[in-house]
Image: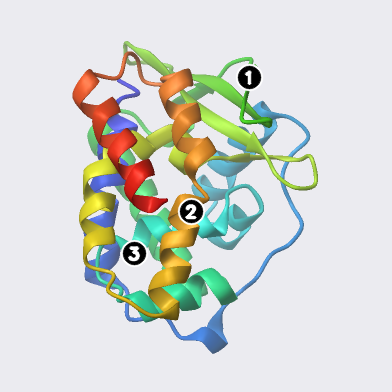
Amino acid sequence: MVRSAVFVLAILLVVVTACTAAPEPESTTTTTLGGAASPEEALNGLFDAIMQGNYQDTALLTFDDQLALMVSLEGFDVADTASMLSNGLPDQVRTNFWESFSDGFPAFAEEELAGVLVGGSEEFAVEGISFATVPVALRQSDGSGGWIARKDGQGRWRLDMFATFGPSFATPFREWLDGLGLGPDADMARAALADQRASLLAALQGQPFGPIGPETVAEVDRLLFEAG
């Protein structure tokens, strides 16, 4: 059941491309404060913001560099990626991403997002960074899984998209790296992906959606090596 969230994220990368123009740096919104006091509050707060259509509030409970990398897999050139990493995401990019998630979730989970139940978290550390697996289930459907949160630089909790979904995108990100080319923008994009090392290792350790197969583990290892 909750594995469906992975597939929702996958289709979002196509949906976002279809409905989003190239980002304009002057329309960006940069958020430096936010997070939640606990992993559970972070996830509940994120779901609430999505259900209420307060898509800009999701910036308080996620990491902008991760979302910039996710949407860059489809439709944005390296200059756009560098702009989003430097200046923050344009409001429309963020809105399109989470609006698509909200619209697509019921088709895959066979239940509305309001049916998500968030359990008590279990903390762990990777390379000195604090993570927590937050159990997630649905009220009417079978199955369960978990999303992974991470403490930010201020000691507050936010959803970590790479720790939660990263292994599913290891192969696309390797292909994306191959096409970046050379130059300052490409260097910035590679560095941003390399910065996700601890999150990807947390995904392999936490395995929020169940055991990760050896082929996926190998792809993550190759991605970490190629990203530097």
User: Which kind of residue does numbered mark 2 sit on?
Assistant: Gln
Task: Name the residue tied to disc 3.
Answer: 72
User: Which kind of residue does numbered mark 1 sit on?
Assistant: Phe
User: Which kind of residue does numbered mark 3 sit on?
Assistant: Ser
Q: Position of residue 153 (x, y in %)?
A: 75, 47
Which mark is drawn over residue 69?
none
From this view, report whether residue 39 is shown above or below residue 70. above
Residue drawn at x 43%, y 70% as measured from the top left: 187
How far apart marks 1 and 3 lie (CA) works out to 29 Å
How far apart marks 2 and 1 lie (CA) works out to 20 Å
The secondary element bearing badge 1 is classed as: strand
Q: Are marks 2 and 3 in contact (CB under 8 Å)?
A: no
Residue drawn at x 58%, y 76% as measured from the top left: 87
Q: Quadrant of the N terminus?
A: top left
Q: In screen coordinates, is 49 left or right of 60?
A: left
Task: Name the residue tied to disc 1.
Answer: 124
Q: Position of residue 122 (x, y in %)?
A: 63, 15
Task: Name the residue tied to disc 2.
Answer: 66
Q: Label 3 crowding class (10 Å Cα cut-off): few <14, some 14-19, many 20+?
A: many
Q: Answer yes or no: is residue 106 visible.
A: no
From this view, report whether residue 142 is shown above or below residue 115. above
Residue drawn at x 22%, y 67% as measured from the top left: 179
Q: Position of residue 128 (x, y in %)?
A: 68, 30
Q: Position of residue 135 (x, y in %)?
A: 52, 17
The secondary element bearing badge 2 is classed as: helix
Question: Coloring scheme of the render?
Answer: rainbow
Residue drawn at x 34%, y 64% as measured from the top left: 72
Tell which of 151 and 134 is nearer to you.
151
Q: Label 2 crowding class (10 Å Cα cut-off): few <14, some 14-19, many 20+?
A: some
